[in-house]
Amino acid sequence: MSASTSIPYFSEDQLAGLGLTTHEVINRIETLILSGDKQQAWSAPKAVIQPGDGRYMMVALAAADDPSVLAVKTVVLNPRNPEQGLPLINGLVTLLDSHSGLPIAILDGNWITAVRTAGLSATAARHMAKNDASVIAFIGCGVQANSHLQAFSTLFPLEKVLLFGRGAVNIERLGDKAAELSLPSVACDSAEEAVTGADIVISSVTHTGDVTPFLDANWLKPGAFAAITDLAVPWGKESFSALDQVVIDDLVQEAAMPNKLMSPDYVTGDLSQLVLGKIKGRNLDSDRNAFVFRGHAMGDLALSTLVYQRALMMSD
Ligand SMILES: NC(=O)C1=CN([C@@H]2O[C@H](COP(=O)(O)OP(=O)(O)OC[C@H]3O[C@@H](n4cnc5c(N)ncnc54)[C@H](O)[C@@H]3O)[C@@H](O)[C@H]2O)C=CC1
Ligand SMILES: O=C(O)C1=NCCCC1
């Protein structure tokens, strides 16, 4: 292999310092989805290893020709990490030239996962949530909740944040983040109180391999939208029958996975169909909708390419 002797590495702080906006992230995700429809970008279903002790190890792969980039994201989720003061999920993104295979850069995978996941939810929310949504609830108050609050606060006229989680520190930290955004927050005594009171619900609880469902989609109020990042493990799956539109991230990936997010009968379509206008995200103001997803490699590629291009531009 002929490559430069050093591959640039971008840390979490460097990536956060680029100052990308949620609108830029959404636009890049949608642009990449359009490229995918024209066969100018591609992704593969994620490869997952679950050894049975709660760990979830995965690789996501996507590539495009304009710009010519292939992204591989490798992460390990370990439910015991937080006890040791570590983030639940750690990993890296490797970027290669999609024609030559030569290395381009290595990116911190934690920041990419936090921001791209909120970017995927925000992309769906733009089509599926009501524009005047003002109360947002978080079930699980960690890294994903934080990145989703940041993203959704720029898209919706939020007035109040409801919090339900485990561990006072995380709940307090998310409350502080809300305060920084000038939003009052309320810690709820039950998940039902948080869900029933919200226009937008974000669920992102720890994946342990054996979560007992404790959330019910029937609790969503008319007009509400839920972004269900956590592979729907805390939700009673049959309760999704109560919803009007349920969009998942990628039908092809879903078909390849052994444990389905839910019965295919409840699925309206996927994110590409939503962005391409092949399915509607919302019909009536009173519809109850959800975006339920396990993580789409196109999101990782979209954000990784965007940050790399921005970093190059800023170093000129
Ligand atoms: N769909 C996707 O692409 C992605 C999904 N995820 C999902 O998001 C989850 C959370 O990830 P992070 O925010 O990085 O982890 P985190 O550890 O920062 O936050 C998880 C939070 O959930 C709380 N929690 C755990 N069990 C709970 C329960 N029964 N009720 C209420 N709260 C509970 C924890 O106390 C913690 O505050 C992951 O486990 C994974 O399922 C994460 C990244 C990407
Ligand atoms: O796609 C991702 O990134 C993840 N998906 C499931 C949980 C770990 C991270």
Image (cartoon, rainbow, N blue to C red):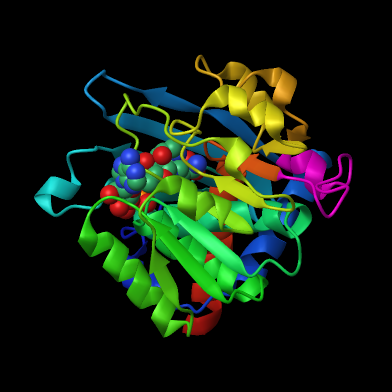
Residue 272, position as x, y percentages in the image: 76, 41
Number of marks drawn: 0
**Is 237 placed above or below 224 here?**
above
Q: Is residue 89 magenta?
A: no
Q: Could you say which is closer to the camera, residue 209 or residue 29?
A: 209
Q: Residue at x 50, y 17 (%)?
A: 259
Kindly indicate the quadrant of the structure image that contains residue 280.
Answer: top right
Left or right: 160, with 78 as reference point: right
SS majority, magenta: loop
Quadrant (top left/top right/bottom left/bottom right) for the N terminus: top left
Q: Residue at x 60, y 74 (%)?
A: 158
Left or right: 282, with 237 as reference point: right
Residue 163, position as x, y percentages in the image: 41, 60
Q: Residue at x 45, y 78 (%)?
A: 184
Judge whether residue 52 can be spotted in this image.
yes
Q: Which residues are magenta?
A: 270-288
Residue 90, position as x, y percentages in the image: 29, 48
Residue 248, position as x, y percentages in the image: 66, 35
**Is 49 placed above or below 296 here?**
above
Kindly indicate the quadrant of the structure image that contains residue 151.
Answer: bottom right
Q: Could you say which is closer to the camera, residue 265 or residue 188?
A: 188
Q: Could you say which is closer to the camera, residue 61 or residue 190?
A: 190
Kindly indicate the quadrant of the structure image that contains residue 178.
Answer: bottom left
Left or right: 9, with 286 as reference point: left
Left or right: 283, with 204 as reference point: right
Q: Residue at x 36, y 72 (%)?
A: 175
* Residue lying farthest to the left in this orientation: 84
Q: Is residue 275 magenta?
A: yes
